[in-house]
Amino acid sequence: MKSYKLLYSSLFALLVAGTSLTSCKDYLDVNDNPNYPVTTTMSALLPSACASTIAQLGLYGDLIGDMWLQFTTQGNTTNQYNTLCNYSLTVNSYNGFFTNAYTNTLPDLKDVITMAEEDEAWDYWVIAKVLTAYNYHMLVDLYEDIPFTEALNQEKYPYPHYDDGQTVVYPGILALLDEAIAKCPQAEEKSSSYIETYDMFLGGDVEKWRKFAKNLKLKVLIRDFEANKQAIQDLLNEGDFLEDDCAFTAFENATDKGNPLYEYNIRQLNTLENIRACHTMVEFLLHYDDPRIVNLYMPTSASGGEGTNAEIYEGLPCGGRPDTDVIKLSESSRYMQAYDNPVYLMNKAEIFFLEAEAYARLGNTSEAEDKYKNGVKAAFDRWESTKGMGDAFVADDGAYVFDATSEETMMKCIMTQKWISYAHANALDGVFDRNRTGIPAISTAATVRVSDVALQRELTPGYELGTLVAPGSSVLQPTDFPRRLLIPSRSSQYNPNAPVTKDLEEPMWWQVERGK
């Protein structure tokens, strides 16, 4: 086994197991782990940075996305994720995003960039720059204001200031991406030895990294569409996006070497009962006879016979509602999980939908429709069992036909299908999209269904398929939705420059108003 595999496997063991870094050296709670020796080569640091990039994203990122987008909910006989389902987050919730990025990922990437400059290894440099931009983008979307200009320089800035997300961090991320794109011609002139092995996302292909950097640029620019309208149009005119998956797939069926969520929820907790199908998504897929349901959920124990016609899929009410939760756990569907589920930085369907949105908002309906159809088909093609089935759904008489009547109808089509496509594929980004566009909307209906008979699908009056519902015991108002993670206590306690913690439901500058 190559040494890099040992490195990222041990890192997963540290991060996925939830090992706590308890030193109080500085605001980031940095601690030297004796089981994780300092590495000094780019070939060791790059796979480490790739793995730590997805360690929290593939565990808590997917959990948050799956639960908040109502693909899944907590099983009604256990309570492992009840606080997540019901939005009961505190300053101690999911701090790993922050501490992992600032103590592991970003310092490793900074070292790769420094070494690459010394060796003129520009392929390493480009990859590290783009991954740095990606990690800062994830952080600023989660927290809004983050250490950026003074980050990663502990000697000079032991207590770095938090930079404004809108005016400093987002422009800084765009600058990082532009730097990487500009350096690609030099990076393509030569290829470093075995970089295809050490790059865990795109196999050391600089051309793919250049295109992926453009994907990220579009994603960042569209956060402030009106201000960036011309830049978005120029980027679309250039085209040349990576219309393919960018994902970590190097997982093994062994302890601490599989998909992070699988390792934690299945292998460590050793139960299939915690994560169950949620009514919201199940009812939508069943209504439209969407065959992707077999790739997301297991049939219930009530299923019988052979073939999908005999299989029953059932979801629990979101967040467990005592007044309506009449479904037994055994009558609900489990969420499909596997050790080799990819962890995506961006999936193929996502970039098509992102392009479709941009074209729709620019008034180019033909391009919007073309990209929309490609996005739906890519979402179906993710699984072998539904490959090619998307064509029928986007046909003129299909269930998911594109409605080009207005910008509003186009956006509803695009963002609804994008919402579905996030199931089992970087669902956390779907939370950002929901808060950015207000789609799916938050329904005022109490729950998806009122029937207590599994096969009688009677929707609550006033409920519209494809909208979210208030969890059973939400700490927020019925039409409120989480907009951020709270500034981690490990920063607020040790860094006097940490900002005052904002409420969970307070929108960021690029998000729609509360109650939408």
Image: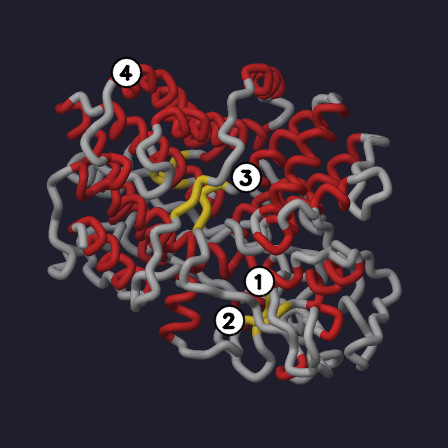
Marks 3 and 4 sit apart, C-alpha to C-alpha, by: 27 Å
At horizontal 65% and vertical 49% (from top left) the residue drawn is 419
Q: CA distance from mark 4 to mark 1?
A: 43 Å
**Closest to the observer: 172 or 1?**
1
* Nearest-to-viewer mark from 2 and 4: 4
Residue position marked by numbered label 2 in the rendering: 81
Q: Quadrant of residue 275?
A: bottom right
> Around disc 3, counting alpha carbons within 10 Å, would you say few (fewer than 14), some (14 to 19), or many (20 or more)?
many
Query: Which residue carries the number 4 mark?
Result: 186
Q: Amino acid at mark 2?
A: Tyr
Q: Is residue 137 above or below residue 104?
A: above
Q: Are marks 2 and 1 in contact (CB under 8 Å)?
A: yes
Query: Mark 2, mark 3: which one is toward the viewer?
Result: 3
Q: Quadrant of residue 47?
A: top left
Element under disc 2: loop
Q: Which mark is residue 348?
A: 3
**Residue 31 at x, y = what percent?**
18, 56
| Crowd class of label 1 (few under 14; some 14 to 19; many from 20; radius 10 Å) | many
Frontmost residue, 381 versus 434: 381
In the rendered image, the residue lying farthest to the front is 306
Instruction: Say if 313 sits above or below 196 in the image.
Output: below
Q: Choose the circle earlier in sequence order: 2 or 3.
A: 2
Q: Earlier in the sequence, mark 2 or mark 4?
A: 2
**Label 1: which residue?**
67
Q: Residue at x 79, y 56 (%)?
A: 288
Q: Amino acid at mark 1?
A: Met
Circle nearer the viewer, 4 or 1: 4
Of mark 3 and mark 4, the one earlier in the sequence is 4
Residue sitting at the far right: 461
Residue 431 is at least partly visible in this image: no
